[in-house]
Structure formats: structure tokens, C-alpha cells
Image (tube, rainbow, N blue to C red):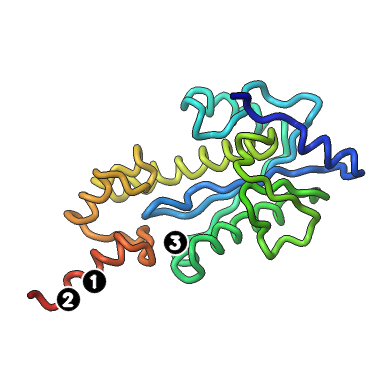
């Protein structure tokens, strides 16, 4: 199976757009931590070699590609907090993080390639949603890499403040060890209370025993 290419970017260029940003987010599935989005405008004449969906890359490859992307592209990273996730819902919070990442690009892009099947409602620029875009578009793949790298570092930092949950390895996803720690150690301020496994633990003690 082939990896991403620049066909979506070339199609936009052929329509007269000049600054095309790929946009992706990471962290919709975890029980803890923020959701993180990135927007990346690549130099399409010299894209980093080996770009792909961040989940398909080794840690070493992600490190190399992140350094190349940051050196040779325009990059913006933004987040939506756990409080915003719980208040809005995870889909809207992930879109909010995307909107913030796009808004922080300077100069602004004139066309967006968005990973997924929805265009965040707060984005007013011309945009195209690309399903599984991190495996199809070079710009979205680049955004997926820098977003994952940033969020993973956040979770490593949080793991030092709250040892025992394994966030340095599970990045807050509901792995067996994370779920077990949640039951044994309880809920931290960084857990998403609107997510069912966390919600259940918070409220099981308040239920009358049968």
C-alpha cells in the first residue's frame, strides 16, 4: 500500500490556491490529557522524505521527520483542554483545537486539507475534508506527526507529576494498565470526566451498595 502524496495539494494549487495547510489532531481516544491539533504548510518542492500517518511510523522516524518539518515548513500547534473536552464533547473540542491551530498560522493559509469527514464549523477558509487523510496527503501526514510528538511529550510530563498511570507509554489511551491504575489510584485532574470509564469510577462510590 502506498503512502501519502501531494495530489490533494496539487489539485488545490491548480485551482489557484497558494498556501495549503494540512490539519490533523491527535488524542480523541485517550481517557486523559488534552486533544492536540497541528496545521502545517509544507514547501511542496522539498517535502521531507518518508512522511506518513504518524501511527505507522517508528518513534525514531517520527523524531527525524518532526525535526525536518519544523525546519522546513510553517507549523502551528494548538490544544483543547480536558475542561473543554468535558464541556463541549470530544468531537467539538478536537475541532476547536484545529481551529486554533489554523488561526495561529502567520501568514494565513488560503486553503485547508482537514483529516476526517467533517470540516470544523469555525473554519471560514476554503477547505476539503479528507477521510484517512494522514495516510493520503503529505501535508496532513506532516500535521499528524508534529501533533503526536507534541502531545506525547505533554503526556510524559504529566506522567512525572502523576506516576503509576503509565502515561509515558500509553499516552492516556485506555490500555489495560491505565484502566487498572484508574481503579487503584483514582481520577486525576487530567482525566476526562465525560468519558465513561472515568465517569463510572467517579460515581461508583456514590451509588448505594446492593
Residue 193 picture location, percent across and down: 35, 65
Tell me residue 19's x, y (percent).
82, 43
Between the C-alphas of marks 1 and 2, the distance is 7 Å
> Looking at the image, which residue is at 70% across and 37% down?
139
Q: Which callout, 2 or 3, points at the residue further toward the start of the chain?
A: 3
Q: What residue sits right under mark 3 in the picture?
A: 82
**Is mark 1 in CB contact (under 8 Å) with mark 2?**
yes
Give 82 or 137, whichever is nearer the viewer.
Answer: 137
Quote the CA–CA distance across marks 3 and 1: 18 Å
| Residue, far bottom | 208
Q: For this view, does 140 lie left or right of residue 81?
A: right
Task: State left or right for residue 58 relative to residue 177.
Answer: right
Please tell me the numbered disc located at residue 203.
1
Residue 165 tag number:
none
Q: At 35% across and 59% down in the image, what residue appears?
A: 191
Q: Quadrant of the C terminus?
A: bottom left
Quadrant of residue 42 within the rendered picture: top right
Residue 163 visible from this viewpoint: no
Amino acid at each position: 500500500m502506498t503512502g501519502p502524496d501531494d495530489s490533494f495539494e496539487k489539485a488545490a494549487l491548480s485551482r489557484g490556491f497558494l498556501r495549503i495547510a494540512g490539519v490533523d489532531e491527535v488524542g480523541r481516544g485517550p481517557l486523559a490529557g488534552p486533544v492536540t491539533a497541528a496545521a502545517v504548510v509544507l514547501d511542496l518542492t522539498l517535502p521531507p522524505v518518508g512522511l506518513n500517518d504518524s501511527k505507522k511510523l517508528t518513534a525514531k522516524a517520527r523524531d527525524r521527520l518532526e525535526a525536518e518539518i519544523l525546519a522546513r515548513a510553517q507549523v502551528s500547534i494548538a490544544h483543547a483542554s480536558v475542561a473543554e473536552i468535558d464541556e463541549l464533547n470530544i468531537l467539538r473540542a478536537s475541532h476547536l483545537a484545529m481551529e486554533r491551530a489554523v488561526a495561529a498560522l502567520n501568514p494565513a493559509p488560503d486553503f485547508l486539507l482537514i483529516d476526517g469527514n467533517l470540516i470544523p464549523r469555525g473554519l471560514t477558509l476554503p477547505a476539503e475534508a479528507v477521510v484517512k487523510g494522514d495516510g493520503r496527503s503529505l501535508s496532513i501526514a506532516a500535521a499528524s506527526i508534529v501533533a503526536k510528538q507534541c502531545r506525547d511529550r505533554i503526556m510524559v510530563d504529566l506522567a512525572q507529576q502523576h506516576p503509576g498511570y503509565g502515561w509515558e507509554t500509553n499516552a492516556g489511551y485506555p490500555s489495560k494498565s491505565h484502566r487498572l491504575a484508574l481503579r487503584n489510584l483514582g481520577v486525576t485532574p487530567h482525566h476526562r470526566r465525560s468519558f465513561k470509564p472515568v465517569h463510572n469510577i467517579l460515581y461508583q462510590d456514590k451509588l448505594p451498595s446492593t
